[in-house]
Image (cartoon, helix red, strand yellow):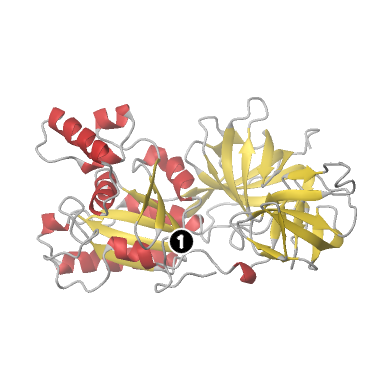
Amino acid sequence: MTTTSHEATATSLLRFATAGSVDDGKSTLVGRLLHDSKSVLADQLEAVEHASRNRGQEAPDLALLTDGLRAEREQGITIDVAYRYFATPRRRFILADTPGHVQYTRNMVTGASTAELAVVLVDARNGVVEQTRRHAAVAALLRVPHVVLAVNKMDLVDYAEPVFAAIAAEFTAYAASLGVEDVLAVPISALAGDNVVEPSAHMDWYGGPTLLEHLETVPVGSDPSSEPARFPVQYVIRPQTEEHPDYRGYAGQLASGVLRVGDTVTVLPSGHTTTIAGIDALGRETDLAWAPQSVTVRLADDLDISRGDLIAAGAAPAPTKDIEATVSHLNERPLRAGDKVLLKHTTRTVRALVKEISYRIDIDSLEQRSGAEGLNVNDIGHVRLRTAEPLALDAYHDNRRTGSFLLIDPADGTTLTAGMAGEAFETVRTTDAPDASEEEDWV
């Protein structure tokens, strides 16, 4: 169910990602958040203090709590996505500290793909810069529902309210143009700890919550009963024992919605309809299940169902072999029209052909650059795909779980591209798209 600010408890979980330009202080902020919330073990803090002394620093460099790779410590930069798990009495957290460099945009896509909140850092001395807009655009593209603008290093601008107000107004207007509705701006100093966990004594003009207070109280999740049920089949259970000679169940994790015994469901892509005869959870029968529970579903009719099929209630998506999607290319190998790939959607993997690279999105200007020969690493663009078998995809803006997919290299299993079905960035096309390539025997 939806969690309100008064209902947040230690049982609720918030996944959030941090992003920002190089040297804006992301790792320091995360380190401060962990340190001041008493989420750092004594031996971890001792190791950070030792490493800081070796680098000639008097105070512990809290950024080292997240810059875990040796190369990151030596260079003083964040390279990979660093995941950290911590909890307060009010909520549990999974945070992803993502790199700030332009060449690591794909890492932010990875870190923010499952996030419900993104913390975008800005250096108060520099304001909103190109990489700030890039990260806001990625958060909007991934449909991250909540965004926090953390205006960092306020201590270096004498905690001036006009500086913060100007930056907050500029970013909020830009985020609104991307369709981001929930934006909170917080003035902080990660180095000094102002407004991170404890309120700042230097900014009495700010009446909003500290960063941690907002993280603890922002609504998370959604009401499963308000979403259509989607149940990707992961495994077919047929024990065929004397005790259960006729048992046939379909195991998996409910991606969204609620399933109840007696519900009418459609099995996709076949389109057959039936009803829920029983639901088993943790070895016991139950009358209902809700996302993201892992359960076994039993159906009233004996249908031909296998791994990769989708059991759907409510308005079921129409299976199709033709897919249009916005994609983020993650691999050093370019993605080109005519490429033969594997497409993984929930528990189903099928062959697919890249028919067209419709356009590449210039994240800085949000313009669509048509005529691109392909997508290189970190590029975001729009593609048309043709699959060998029909797939039941929801639009990504309706369902992040069943509207997303991966493109995989069939030769070695390498992940190439992350896709969001039915998405189209609301930008201005500059030229006509090239003609689609011809289909091949692959599909």
Residue at the front extreme?
243
Left-right relation of 240 to 154? right
Q: Secondary structure at mark 1?
A: loop
Left-right relation of 12 to 353? left
Which is more toward the observer, 151 or 200? 200
Where is mark 1, residue-wise? 12
Residue drawn at x 16%, y 68% as measured from the top left: 161
Residue drawn at x 77%, y 50% as measured from the top left: 250
Estimate the x, y position of residue 225 in percent, counting from the top left.
63, 70
Task: Tell me where residue 335 sits by quadrant.
Answer: top right
Estimate the x, y position of residue 190 in percent, counting from the top left.
21, 52
Which is more toward the observer, 264 or 43? 43
Residue 137 appears in the rendering: yes
Residue drawn at x 24%, y 40% as measured from the top left: 42
Estimate the x, y position of residue 178 in percent, counting from the top left.
45, 63
Which image quarter is the C terminus in?
Answer: top right
Q: Is residue 80 above or below residue 8?
A: above
Residue 364 appears in the rendering: no
Which image quarter is the N terminus in?
Answer: bottom right
Left-right relation of 33 to 60? right
Residue at the top extreme?
411
Estimate the x, y position of residue 69 in percent, counting from the top left.
34, 31
Left-right relation of 440 to 49? right
Task: Tell me where residue 334 sits by quadrant.
Answer: top right
Amino acid marked by disc 1: Ser
Which is more toward the observer, 232 or 384? 232
